[in-house]
Amino acid sequence: MTATAPAAAQTLRANPEYRRWLVGDLCLDLGTGIGMFAVPLITLMVTDSLGATGMVGLAQGLGTLAGLIPGGLLADRCGRRRLRLLAGMTGMLVQAVLIAVLAAGWGSLGTLAALVFADRLRATLFGSASNAMLKQIVPPALLPRAFAVNEGREAAVEMGSGPLGGALLGISLLCPPLAQLLGELGSVLATLAMRGSYPPRPQGAPRSRVRDDLRDAVAWTLSQRIRRQLLAVAVAVNLGVNGLILTVLLDLASAGVAAERIGLLNTALAASILLGAIAVPRLVDRVHTGALTIVPIVLMVAVGAFLPVAPGMLGIGAAYAVMGLGLAPLNAATQGFFMHLTPVAMQGRITALMGLVSMGLVPLAPVLAGWGLELAGPLPTLLLFAAITALGALAAVLGPDLRRVPVAAQWESFARQQGIADGG
């Protein structure tokens, strides 16, 4: 922990700096959740084309990927609080431009694609610093609980952002981007209230070259077989699950289902994630992290196989609820474990590298979903994404490393036995 970080608190609730960090992320998540839910629907309403909607989704994903590595490097070289402020301020600017474009009736495919690309680019370029600061704010013993709180917070936001985004969209195309602008503003105000600056390196540490920073991060990541296995799992599961959800959303929207009803599916998913998040603190203390990783992925495969034959909205909602139950334990266990292993000075780069690889194929999801629906229909498209998810489950089950990761209390001893402990 750096000299500018607050003294370690015994509980998350007793840590005022963590509360300020959490409020900022809550505001950001709510605004972004509304905006992200509305983007494909806005694009479909403006262009009246599923293919164009998929292309805008592709631009959105490419913007995220383009900012990951530079953002990770920035988070490990610059004050992380300052970067979080830049993320909020640039987000407000992009949403203001989007509002002006929609109000003027200039919402073409090219314009929307450029704006969503810019929005996701600046979010990962500057926003990567937010999670990188968490290990400096929260003591290592509380990291699993902090991730559990994050999962619960995101689930609660998701419960409201889908229906709220649909309702706002019913009022005006301008309302969802306005909501995202206000969320960015809330994040800026909460970050201004934080006390620490959170430099990634101790004061007086020697400066390093960017290429050396990147090379060290790549070497650190590739040196650990368990990280390589998780990346292989994440590549398939992220593409498969995102594709399933996008295919359902676009299929329902093209069939004329109201945005408010589609938003209720997000609520079902988020409610089950919230239930899972409530159980996370006990689960990470009592259940092996390997099991908390593999079992939810197997559940996702079962959902993927069921969705093509789901009987209407109730069936889809039930499938989403089953899928969501395991997401919070999965994310809290894996993210907490790997953040625990990663040195403070490398948090930004390692997170960026793992995000780039694990999310690298996700921009294909909206393209495959949009064109798949137009050319082949919903059944073949859903089956394709279900098969991709199944490949991720196979990688999780067949590899030995994830299965061996113990409960959170034994992470440190396990990491030292395996030679993957935090080196700094």
Image (tube, rainbow, N blue to C red):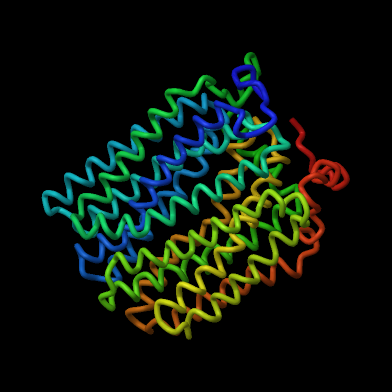
Residue 184 position by quadrant? top left
Q: Answer left or right for 258 relative to 239.
A: left
Q: Answer left or right for 193 relative to 302.
A: left
Front residue of this view, candidates 115 and 328: 328
Which residue is painted at 53% across and 32% down in the image?
A: 19
Q: Looking at the picture, does residue 183 appear above or below residue 272?
A: above
Q: Answer left or right for 399 relative to 390.
A: right
- Furthest residue in direction top, as rendered: 204
Q: Looking at the picture, does residue 344 appear above or below residue 164?
A: above
Front residue of this view, candidates 344 and 282: 282
**Residue 99 spot, x, y in % from top left:** 20, 46
**Residue 161 spot, x, y in % from top left:** 38, 54
Q: Looking at the picture, does residue 63 appear above or below residue 397?
A: above
**Residue 131 spot, x, y in % from top left:** 55, 38
Task: State the quadrant of the N terminus.
Answer: top right
Task: State the quadrant of the C terminus.
Answer: top right
- Furthest residue in direction left, as rendered: 104
Which residue is painted at 34% across and 39% down in the image?
A: 91
Which residue is painted at 51% across and 74% down in the image?
A: 319
- Furthest residue in direction right, as rendered: 417
Q: Is residue 212 visible?
A: no
Q: Answer left or right for 416 relative to 271.
A: right
**Residue 346 spot, x, y in % from top left:** 64, 35
Front residue of this view, candidates 217 and 9: 9
Residue 283 position by quadrant? bottom right
Q: Is residue 2 visible?
A: yes
Which residue is painted at 61% across and 29% down in the image?
A: 14
